Amino acid sequence: MDKSRKNRTDGISQLIPKLVQAGLAGNRQQLELLSLTAIRAHKSEFPEMAAQLSELLAKFAVTGAAIRHYKAEPPPADADAGLALLRIQPTEDALDPILHHDIKKTIERFLRERTQSDCLLREGFGPPRSLLLKGAPGTGKTMLAFSVARKLGLPLVVLDLATSISSYLGKTGSNLRRSLDYARAKPCVLLLDEFDAIAKRRDDSTEVGELKRIVNVLLKELEEWPMHSVLVAATNHPELLDPAINRRFDVVVVLSLPGEPEREAILEMGCGHFVETLPKGFLTAIAKITTDRNGSELISLASAVVRRHIVEKTSLAPLFVEEIEQRCSPTLQKREMGALTKALHNAAGLSVREIAALVGKSSSTVQYHLTKREDQHA
């Protein structure tokens, strides 16, 4: 036997006992890592073995075969309050958030690497297992988690941090451990919302030792999270996170306020089929003046307008104008109206008379807004 072949055989002989040990100990993460190592190291010399290992990983780790064995079990509850620590949420009707093009591509790549994980496993690489979502409130983090779970065909399990974080810090650690153990036992998407509440910087002098130990638990969990599940964390305050947290996530996405094309698409989604009753270019004009609104606010605006349209039997466009005025502070109303009239004139191509009818103002008022510069509206 030549030396190189002997080295490869010795390598397998060392791996097999480790694989058996991990299996007998129930250490799934170690079993997966050792299997991936065996595929990468010995695929060329033992292709049949590598193929069998990759098929087993695909079957029991990240594909639908594992889901068929999923049996709903009651989630763990807080020992004292008796409240469930986790919620299993339905995702069948989850909508896809309207995302910036670059972010959409990142999420699509994440999903593709999950759904086509067999390609990665054949080469000894695992799919991404964790996703960190950063962004201001209302930018679509929770909505995105629901969408990811639906597209992967996995149950969405949400950790209720308000219940888990106890005034008795020792119990907080216990609640977190039980929740994580439940989520990692079966294929699912685990959403840790308000992640900064339990993943704060360990150098924060205001935090006590127990919370710092909880961060250490989280770091270890992120490193050892099983391939069959996805851990999604969302935070409104990324500056509060421990620096080591970012490095433990496979994919980090920053969700910002929607741009003009995204705002228009969100408004269209919020209007549903009623969008067909609006003048051409109207929502383009609305999108131009809602620069500081997040996706949640835009959906709320469109939904309120549609409800009034249905109940009051009033045209949609004037209701949009009324709602925008009502949601603005008095100091902004004049500026918003000026911006809206210009947007309706330029984007929708409406005449002064048509704009006046839509916004409920006189033609002279509309003409005034059209001829004034932006700084004169301030």
Image (cartoon, rainbow, N blue to C red):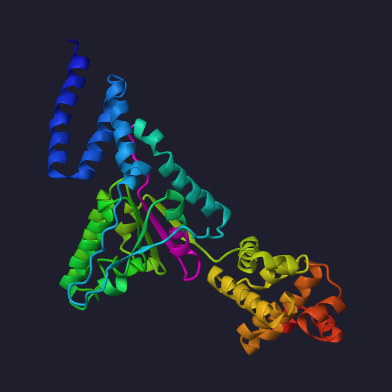
Residue 186 lies, in percent from the top left, at: 28, 51
Residue in the picture at 25% in, 54% down: 221
Q: Residue furthest bottom?
A: 330
Query: Taking the image as drawn, is residue 160 in sight?
Result: yes
Residue 201 lies, in percent from the top left, at: 29, 66
Specify the segment rendered in magenta.
Answer: 124-146
Q: Nearer the viewer, residue 280 or 126?
A: 280
Left or right: 105 as drawn, with respect to 330: left
Residue 29 lies, in percent from the top left, at: 23, 44
Residue 196 lies, in percent from the top left, at: 34, 68
Q: Which picture quadrant has residue 148? A: bottom left
**In which quadrant is the N terminus drawn?**
top left
Q: Nearer the viewer, residue 378 or 153?
A: 153
Residue in the picture at 18% in, 14% down: 3
**In which quadrant is the C terminus drawn?**
bottom right
Placement of 355 over or under 58, stated as above or below: below
The answer to if 134 sits in the magenta stretch is: yes
Placement of 236 over or under 151, stated as above or below: below
Q: Which picture quadrant has residue 240? A: bottom left
